[in-house]
Image (tube, rainbow, N blue to C red):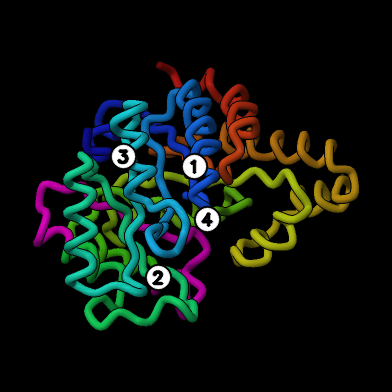
Amino acid sequence: MLISQMFKRKPCVFSIECFPPKQSVNFANMQNTLRTMKDLHPDYISVTYGAGGSAGGVSTVEVTKFLKNDLGIEPLAHILCMGSDRQKAAALLNELDEAGVRNVLTLRGDRTPTRPESPDFRHASDLAAFVWQTKPEFDIHAACYPEGHPEAATLAQDVENLRYKQQAGASHLLTQLFFDNGKFYRFLNLARRAGITLPVSAGVMPIVRRTQIERTVALSSASLPSAFTRMISRWQDDPESLRKAGIEYAVNQLRDLIEGGADGVHLYAMNDAGVAAAVYDGIRDLLGD
């Protein structure tokens, strides 16, 4: 099923994100994790970009194929501008098509030493337009940033740039993680006033380990509300309490978003089926069938 159709059938679409393991020997463990996540009844599972092959890891295509053909879960494959060009992008789209995967999230991707700038796709909207032209049967999805992209001069400018993604064929927007729902509601209001009509899924990550504070929170550029910083200050040296508090914070955040009318909620679960299950238990009564 095309994911865009899900938003026409449900008041709030529930999805989970996973990432391919960096070592192929860990794929069996990931498959077990995904089998557990299937019991949470996600409408779809998104899979971050992994090249696989000579890199020694598992590719996005392999994971999406397992989700689609073995578990019967609709996958959303991440594809990047960085390190790609028209020829590579076409080959990847063909691989996904052969696997029966037709939902793609078009992203620019982070700049790294191993991912050079694309000669063909400067922006994610360029990649989206390419998918639309070469695989019109595909469902195109795009990212958005409730607090503005780090490289945008202002939030208003970043919201205006979403027009390009909408015009390039995107059918749905998925947000970067955030911890302050007020920022999301402000962003959504600005987007609607700017003529962005696409459904928007709100992305939430439970912070359950100290390493996430040091890595994820610092790199996300998301602002930290006082309730969140108090939680971290109180429990950062108590692993079990931090896990419980982080799950509770995410549940409260998601419940507010669902009750506030979010088109979808997206759980950045970091391949942790236990955390995903605990969060799902806290919101399942609001999700319906």
Q: Are marks 1 and 3 in contact (CB under 8 Å)?
A: no
Residue 56: percent from left, percent from top = 46, 59
Does the rendering let one see residue 167? Answer: no
Amino acid of disc 4: Lys
Amino acid of disc 2: Asp
Judge depth for marks 4 and 2 and give the one in front. Answer: 4
- Write the residue at 68% across / 66% down: 218
Which residue is label 4 attached to? 22
Q: Secondary structure at mark 1?
A: helix
Does the rendering let one see residue 271? Answer: yes
Which residue is label 1 attached to? 27
Amino acid of disc 1: Phe
**Callout 2: 10 Å neighbours few (<14), some, many (20+)?**
many
Which residue is label 3 attached to? 65
Q: Quadrant of residue 261?
A: top left
Judge depth for marks 3 and 2 and give the one in front. Answer: 3
- Write the residue at 49% across / 44% down: 18
Residue interval drawn in magenta: 131-157
Mark closest to the chain's N terminus, 1 or 3 = 1
Q: CA distance from mark 3 to mark 2?
A: 34 Å
Q: Secondary structure at mark 3?
A: helix
